[in-house]
Amino acid sequence: MELKELFNSSNVKLELQSEEKDDVLMELISLLKLDDKAKEMLFKMLKKRENLGSTGIGKGFAIPHCRSLVVDKLNVAFGRHTKGVDFNSIDGKPANYYFLIVAPPVEISNYYLPVLGKVAQFCKSTDITAKLDKLEKVEDFLALLEETGS
Amino acid sequence: MQDSQLRLLMFLQDLLMLKREMEDFQVVEKYEEMGFDLERKEKIEEAIREVTGQLDPELHHRFQIIASKYDRPLAPVKNGICYGCFVSTPTGSKLVTQKNDVIEFCNHCGRILYQPGTL
């Protein structure tokens, strides 16, 4: 599965507003089509995952992820924060670019780890932060995924 | 707000799933190759203890019995079918917990049932 197949205008937000790590997580979760209780449970699960080690992989990227019963298929979201937020990233720098990945415990297609790997690879692409910074609208992000073959 | 016993069980199952991932050397290696830091992965035990501490003891006991048979003790019900054993569940057996939550079990496989989308 290619990343461009997973993103659309409703799960991408180029101007995240939150100023704290927890609020960023909630803002990303809000991009998924879930009811309030499911969002709350997902937030708790993502927090527990963050407690094992931050998903801030450095260079401005964070990829919060988990498996949870509250979703019945793979869900993703992308958010960009212009100033960046402290996400306890491994390089100690704020995170500006966020990919949220949530999957059910069992998926027939088993895309979770491959998608996580593709996102991690995308984050390591040449000049990717400069390209992400230039995005003006959601369609530009979708085009960037297409351009990078992700 | 207090979580319902069913939501706590769902959370517990998610945490146990995460624990299994953290115990799988190959999966951990994949995560580390992707650039994730998992230096505090033992913290998962603490999270599991925290959730089990909030569970009705009888319900937790039944969960453990089911978990000893199946990797995933909870199963969704869709269109009256238990998605653990794929058998119709017209009338599941029930347990009313001390907190007055009603937990339903599949009559066929015994898994704890939940309705996706109605947490």
Image (cartoon, coloured by chain):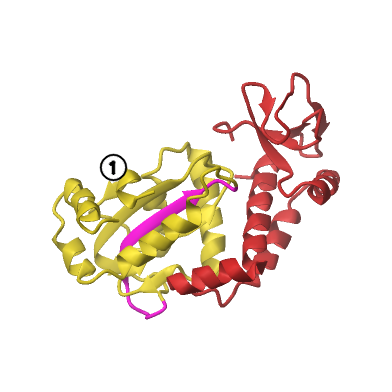
Chain colours: A yellow, B red
Residue B60 x %, y %: 81, 48
Q: In the rendered structure, the residue with mark 1 lies on which chain?
A: A
Identify residue type, mark 1.
Asn
Examine the rendered structure and indicate whether residue A5 appears above or below residue B36. above
Q: Is residue A142 left or right of residue B99?
A: left
- The vertical placement of A57 against B97, above or below, is below
Up/down of A109 relative to A51, above or below: above
Q: Is residue A53 visible?
A: no
Q: Nearer the viewer, residue A83 or A61?
A: A61
Q: Position of residue B5 (x, y in %)?
A: 71, 42
Residue A38 placed where, x, y %?
52, 41
Q: Is residue A60 left or right of residue B47?
A: left
Q: Nearer the viewer, residue A14 or B21?
A: B21
Is A62 left, or right, of A40 in this rendering? Answer: left
Exactly how many numbered labels are in the figure? 1
Q: Foreground: B93 or B2?
A: B93
Would you say residue B5 sits in the magenta stretch?
no
Q: Quadrant of the C terminus of chain A?
A: bottom left
The answer to which image quadrant residue B119 occupies is top right
Outermost residue toward the bottom in this view: A91
In the rendered view, would you say A18 is above or below B41? above
- Residue A97 in magenta? yes
Which residue is located at x 44 percent, y 53 percent? A101
What residue is shown at x 67% (from left), y 21% (from top)?
B80
Q: Which residue is mark 1?
A: A8
Span shown in magenta: A90-105
Q: Residue B27: horizontal and vertical position, in percent?
A: 58, 66
